[in-house]
Image: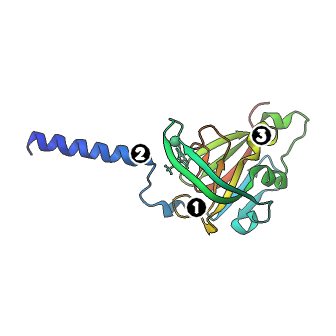
Amino acid sequence: MHQAIRIFLLAGALVFCGQSFAAGTVADPSQYLTESVSVSGAVENTLKLRVDDLRKFPPQQVGEVPLVCQTGADVGKLGNFNGVRLRDILEQAVIVSRDHNDVKKMVIVASASDGYQVVFSWSEVFNSPVGDGVLVFFEKDGKPLAEDEGRIAMISTKDLRSGPRHVKWLQAIEVRKIVE
Ligand SMILES: Nc1nc2c(c(=O)[nH]1)N[C@H]1C(S)=C(S)[C@@H](COP(=O)(O)O)O[C@H]1N2
Ligand SMILES: [Mo]
């Protein structure tokens, strides 16, 4: 093959890959769909919540959240969705706390079906204004979440850069005490 053509094709492939990375595009997102989220770890009641179970918590409606990547890049927005507070879910699960100071050593790990994971601290969720905006959501424009993030997802609406803790395809919530 002519050297110039080879370089041209290589450059094209690199641009294509770069774009799919930047946009976080997944070839077949349907493989990641989640129909329920488990709540486990340091809790008295292990839960497995489907969308119908999530609807039983106090509803939180959100108009619009700009999505900003960790890099600062604008990655769109999340609009007109319904969810429930992570705090309300954890109150039903009841965090195991033997000592008055146990909860302050705990984190909540949120995991998605593609292996993506983020953490929250107990203090953030239960004792800061950020916690008011940490939502597990399941409905957008009155419809179930589409394959690109559904059927259950999560977002911390008050984060400065909201992309990282917009967890698509949420599968598990685990409470862990990380220091003794
Ligand atoms: N499950 C899952 N959720 C995720 C990610 C991921 O890789 N997997 N990437 C996060 C990051 S860093 C950003 S900026 C946004 C990107 O959203 P987009 O794929 O819609 O562009 O999703 C977030 N949620
Ligand atoms: Mo990101």
Which label lies toward us, 2 or 3?
Answer: 3
Residue linked to disc 3: 129
- Residue located at (65% from left, 40% from top): 159
Few, some or many residues within 10 Å of mark 3 (<14, 14–19, 20+): few
The amino acid on which the numbered mark 3 sits, given as a three-letter code, is: Pro
Residue 144 locus on image (x, y percent): 61, 67
Q: Secondary structure at mark 3?
A: helix
The amino acid on which the numbered mark 1 sits, given as a three-letter code, is: Gly
Q: Quadrant of the C terminus?
A: top right
| Closer to us: 21 or 33 | 21
Q: Residue furthest front?
A: 63
Quadrant in the picture for residue 84:
bottom right
Q: Secondary structure at mark 1?
A: loop
Residue linked to disc 1: 150
Residue linked to disc 2: 21
Q: Residue furthest top?
A: 180
The amino acid on which the numbered mark 2 sits, given as a three-letter code, is: Phe
- Residue located at (79% from left, 65% from top): 56
From this view, report whether residue 108 is shown above or below residue 149: above
- Earlier-in-chain disc, 3 versus 1: 3
Cα separation between marks 1 and 2: 20 Å
Residue 94, disc: none
Q: Residue furthest left?
A: 2
- Residue located at (48% from left, 60% from top): 29
Q: Is residue 158 left or right of residue 30?
A: right
